[in-house]
Amino acid sequence: MTLENQHIAMDFGGAGDGRTNALGLLLLSMADDEFVIGFSDSEWTGIGPILEEDVAISSIAQDELGHAQALYTLLAELVADGRDADAIAYDRPPEGYLHARLLDHPRGDWAATIVRRYLYDTADAARLQALVDSSHRPLAELVAKIRREERYHLMHVETWLERLARAPGEPRDRLLAALAAMAPDAGTVLAPLPGEPALVRHGIIAEPFAAIEGRWREGVARAFGQLGLPDLPPTRDPGRARADHSQAFRALHTEFTMVRGSEVGATW
Amino acid sequence: MVMTVATPAAASRPVTTAAVRFALTTVHDPEIPTVSIVDLGLVHDIRVEADRIAVELLPTFLACPALEVIRSTVVDALAVFDRPLDVSFTFAVPWTTERLTPAGAAGLRKAGIAPPAEPSAVRCPYCDSSRVAMDSLFGPALCRSLFYCRDCRQPFEAFKVI
């Protein structure tokens, strides 16, 4: 199997059964998700709505960048083409990133950040759950580590979702507006990857993405039901869940590649 | 009259796992000078081989910015053994708060940080009161939350359970 997206320019090796390709795509999509949401959330540093939340969202963003770094490192070891985690993270054009469309929305207001975090964190938790016993041992070990940290992110965002949903007027209105904009893209995090049959066959992931998405939707429906929030709609254009990145992402990409691009080859 | 005292050459000094572990007790978390990385439970494995010393450490949080500082401090602390070093971080087992030793917990308290406990069981590191309230899950470092003691009226940090 080859990658359809030529801009990723990554040869995952010649494993005839497609295992390496599929695993590489999985690692890259997860790493890009964590990297993009981490970088987006870091935009709140210094302008958070209150001091505690400035610290909280900055810590969460820092965690996500740490997870991205660890995932890019696993990918670098898998591909072994001489590129390190930084090279994979920064040296691609915007078209080469595989993050889910949910993360392509601009930062928006605090309600938008909470909605994006809630939808992403719950979907990511479902994905991580399916990787706990992965046959790729380094991934299973990393996932065990990441889940311990993500627990705190979930506690934080669930508290905020409830706080906004139960506050009539502007807080709830802003929450509903953010949901209307992002809910159709929520399922993009769990849209099937091209290598999914190989991932399942080789025991890298416990079950197909459709099954993971089903469990995730049940959990969200329960939480939304208790808060009187509208049900999630089906995923918009799931076939292009990780393609066609937005203008907002292109602006973000310009920013996060700026320092590395200013002095090519420099060490920090 | 000249007295000669026999001093063993550095190269012949025996290098043992215990000696390496002892040397690591001089390495501290850069933000918590009262706790060594041994008492913090960061040391996963020490292997002394004929041609190198390998140390595997566990990160508390993956994005902890202190990791590189800790790694380079370990390299400095083991330079005395005059043998090639391989100091790395591993996720082979996740670091958990149970790895903290009693001395480590005491060291945290000394630094004004409550040792890890579920939020309902956290006690003030200054006056040991249990009348404390969590201000924020997220504190000045990834590994800590913010609390306030209602008895001694002191804000303090508590190590997160992980």
Image: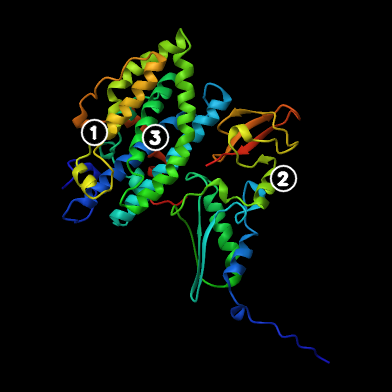
Q: Which residue is mark 1?
A: A210
Residue matched to label 2: B110
Circle 1 crowding by C-alpha within 10 Å: few under 14, some 14–19, many from 20: few
* Label 2 secondary element: helix
Q: Quadrant of the N terminus of chain B?
A: bottom right
Label 2 near label 1: C-beta < 8 Å? no
Amino acid of disc 2: Lys
Mark number, residue A238: none
Q: Residue furthest bottom?
A: B1
Query: Which residue is at 75% across, 85% downward?
Result: B5
In the structure shown, which secondary structural element does the residue marked by tag 3 occupy? Answer: helix
Q: Toward the viewer: A36 or B147? A: B147
Mark 3, residue position: A255
Q: CA distance from mark 3 to mark 2?
A: 42 Å
Which chain is indicated by disc 3? A
* Camera-side residue of A105 and B12: B12
Chain letter, disc 2 residue: B
Residue in view at x 24 percent, y 52 percent:
A20
Three-letter residue code for mark 3: Glu
Check the residue under mark 1 and report the chain it is in: A
Q: Is residue A257 visible?
A: yes
On screen, residue A42 above or below A18? above
Q: Count neighbours of disc 3 (C-alpha within 10 A) and say few if under 14, some if 14 to 19, many if 20 or more.
A: few
User: In the depicted view, which residue is nearer to us: A214 or A41?
Assistant: A214
Distance, label 1 to label 2, CA atoms, is 51 Å
Relative to residue A170, is residue A235 drawn left or right?
left
Q: Residue furthest top?
A: A169
